[in-house]
Amino acid sequence: MSATASSRERNAREAYKSGSTMARTLESLDPGTPVLAGETQVGVVSGVYAEGASRGVEVVAVRWDARGEDVAIPSSEILSIDAAGVRLMRQEADQYADLAPFDPARFPTLRRIA
């Protein structure tokens, strides 16, 4: 292995350690991570769920502040993850009034991964 390849591999491993500047992934979200619609915090992550044996995230459960309950956010609704937290696609909190309450018992094929 060349010195350059070894250096790249080491840098890639370092990028995923805590405190890294590399963007976090859905799979690495911690409970309590803020969730934002635009610049407004609407809740915090309460769990991350994958389908069956997959590591790909299907649903992020969010403790929605205004409702006082967990709601299911499909992973396709997540715009990005940055230092502030999880940013949702829609910019206004009221655009999420249609979110279903999240009850893990209603989703028997989902498995909690974080």
Image (spheres, grey):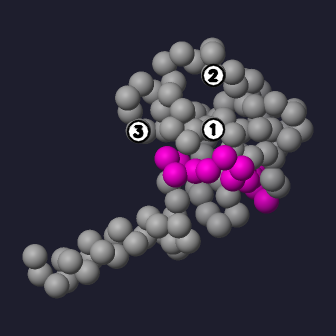
Is residue 16 shown left or right of residue 8?
right
Secondary structure of residue under mark 3: loop
Whether residue 88 is visible = no
3 and 1 marks in contact (CB < 8 Å): no
The image quadrant that residue 16 belongs to is bottom left
Amino acid type, residue under disc 3 in the picture: Arg
**Quadrant where the image shows the C terminus:** top right
Q: Are marks 1 and 2 in contact (CB under 8 Å)?
A: yes
User: Which type of secondary structure does the marked residue at label 2 adopt?
Assistant: helix
Determine whether 94 is above or below 39 in the image. Answer: above
Q: Which residue is mark 1?
A: 47
User: Residue 60 appears at what percent x and percent y?
Assistant: 61, 38
Residue 84 in which image quadrant: bottom right
Instruction: Tell me the amino acid under the disc marked 2.
Output: Pro
- Determine crowd level at label 1: few under 14, some 14-19, many 20+ residues with C-alpha closer than 10 A: many
Which segment is the magenta one? 26-39
State which tag comes first along the sequence, 1 or 2.
1
Between 97 and 6, the one nearer to me in the picture: 6
Q: CA distance from mark 1 to mark 2?
A: 10 Å
Q: CA distance from mark 3 to mark 1?
A: 14 Å
Task: Name the side, left or right, on which 11 lies relative to 3.
Answer: right
To which residue does mark 3 refer? 55
Place of residue 105 in the rendered image (x, y in percent of width and height, measured from the top left):
63, 16
Q: Which of 42/18 is in front?
A: 18
Q: Residue at x 48, y 32 (%)?
A: 50
Which of the two discs, 3 and 1, labels the residue nearer the N terminus?
1
Question: Which residue corresponds to mark 2?
Answer: 104
Number of residues whose C-alpha sits closer than 10 Å to that of mark 2, classed few (under 14), some (14–19) or many (20 or more): some
Assess whether residue 33 is covered by the magenta stretch.
yes
What is the distance, in whole Å, between disc 2 and disc 3 at their CAs? 17 Å
Please tell me in which quadrant of the rendered image residue 11 appears.
bottom left
In x, y percent, where is residue 92? 80, 47
